[in-house]
Image (cartoon, helix red, strand yellow):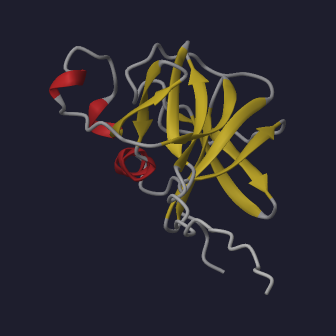
Amino acid sequence: MTQTPVISVPPVLPAAPPARRACLFALAGRRFAVDVRSAREVVLFDEITAVPRAPRHVVGVANLRGTVMPIVDVRGLLGLPEARPAGSLRTLVIRDGAVQAAVVVDTVLGLEPFEDVVLTDSPTTAGMWGPRPLMAGWIQWAGETLALLDAAKILAALATSTPAVAQEASA
């Protein structure tokens, strides 16, 4: 009688839940992150239309595939030294529901996974610099702790000073 060898197959473990991802960018020499669920795309705008009597943070508006996109500089909102961008502008389009805006950034560092978010009021981050009212928390990337910005809070802060900014036209 011949025996067939029995091979032991380890049980299939459920895949680990996918890590959250963040879009990392630099602005005024500091690195920040935004959850990719709020980051829509990176756009380079060459032609920008100025908006008369607009608040200081509104750089202008531009056409993004048929949508009038407000372009905003959030340096002042984040507590960074203000600078008036000129020429072609690299932006990160962020969105919360029907509200969106193109935020001027110096450079986009890429999309990176992250595991845990350390809350802004955590004792471990007490001495760290960050725009806490506009943050969802802190994340770790390449040995560095970055402020994870909350797109909804940023857009709300922009809208309170400019009611018409970032409202998407309803089709």
Residue 68: which quarter of the image?
bottom right
Residue that protrudes farthest toward the front in the picture: 1
- Residue at 66 percent across and 23 percent down: it is 106
Q: Is residue 76 left or right of residue 92?
A: left
* Quarter containing the C terminus: bottom right
Instruction: Choose between 167 and 150: the one closer to the eye.
Output: 150
Q: Position of residue 101 (x, y in %)?
A: 58, 50
The one nearer the camera, 80 or 170, is 80
In the orientation shown, which residue stands out farthest toward the bottom?
A: 1
Placement of 21 over or under 57, stated as above or below: below
Q: Position of residue 95 (x, y in %)?
A: 54, 57
- The residue lying at 60 percent from left, 29 percent from top is 25
Q: Quadrant of residue 3?
A: bottom right
Q: Residue at x 57, y 69 (%)?
A: 12
The one of 8 and 23 positioned closer to us in this rendering? 8
Residue 47, above or below 66: above
Residue 88, quarter of picture: top right
